Image (cartoon, grey):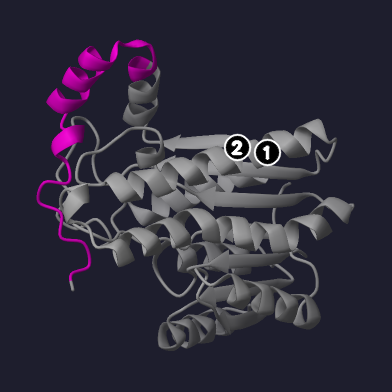
Amino acid sequence: MKSVAGKNVLVTGAAQGLGKLFATRAVEENAAAVVLWDVNEAKLKETAVELEAAGGTVHTYVVDVSAAQQVQDAAASVRADVGDVHVLINNAGIVRGNGYFWDNAVSDIEATMTINALAPMYITREFLPAMIASEQECRVVTIASSAGLTSVPRLAAYCGSKWAATGWSDSVRLELEKAGHKHVRVTTVCPTYINTGMFDGAQGILFTPMLEQDDVVADTWREMLKGGPQLILPWTSRLSKAVTGVLPVKIRDIWLDRTGVYDSMAKFTGHGK
């Protein structure tokens, strides 16, 4: 795929941050329609106005992606209003809870698992059959996390949600390949901490600066277009995955502890209350 020109692109968590940047890229590449899903109605409207001023054909839907029925209803509306979706970017995500797992509220655990792990499944299930039936090149991108590859203390529920998202996304990729639907490509994106405000207070990891949103979007977009299976950012995270995959657990723990991974959430604040 050279661009998303002429295609319908749907982005979740599209009102701000990475989602807004993904939607902006779609407008810049002359997507036929850019569909924005978000739970924040006010921000969603602001983003839509900006993208329409830039020449985009934009459709907005206020959706709580953690609610399966809302996802089904919104997907039906998209099919009626816009038609089939050719590019789906599962971007919506949250970080809830602070501190050790046993101090996390059940409501925070449930929200984390539902939005980060189940929602991409709900949403992709709605649009994937039409992608398979289509003769066009189609794409599904899921923004997971390096926390879906490496365990992080004080981030247990989030890690659990992203491990689930990573495993599910890559399994769907393999299913499509095995079934011969090679025009539908799935890309799983696993970045470390991104400078969106979501991980405010997270401490630095050796040779691993906080990632900038523009860089993550640019790298993801490039990988999505070529249909790459997985993108791990930055290079230190790829190195860590390779090294820790062969080390005994105790030595792995020493390595990750000394490089700062295991203490990276010790002073986490996030967006605040």
| Location of mark 1 (residue) | 173
| Residue 12: x %, y % from top left | 53, 67
Q: 6 or 143, which lies in front?
A: 143
Does residue 259 lie above or below 224 as drawn? above
State yes or no: residue 267 in magenta. Answer: yes
Evaluate if marks 1 and 2 touch, with contact meaning CB atoms under 8 Å apart: yes
Q: Which mark is residue 88?
A: none
| Location of mark 2 (residue) | 170
For the question of whether residue 134 can be seen, the reply is no
Does residue 204 lie above or below 15 as drawn? above
| Residue 16: x %, y % from top left | 41, 72
Q: 127 or 138, which lies in front?
A: 127
Q: 102 or 132, which lies in front?
A: 102
User: Position of 214 compared to 211: left or right?
Assistant: right
| Residue 209: x %, y % from top left | 23, 41
* Quadrant position of residue 71: bottom right
Dot 2 lies on which element?
A: helix
Q: Which residues are magenta?
A: 243-272
Q: CA distance from mark 1 to mark 2?
A: 5 Å
Q: 172 or 229, which lies in front?
A: 172
- The residue under label 1 is which amino acid type? Arg
- The residue under label 2 is which amino acid type? Asp
Dot 1 lies on which element?
A: helix
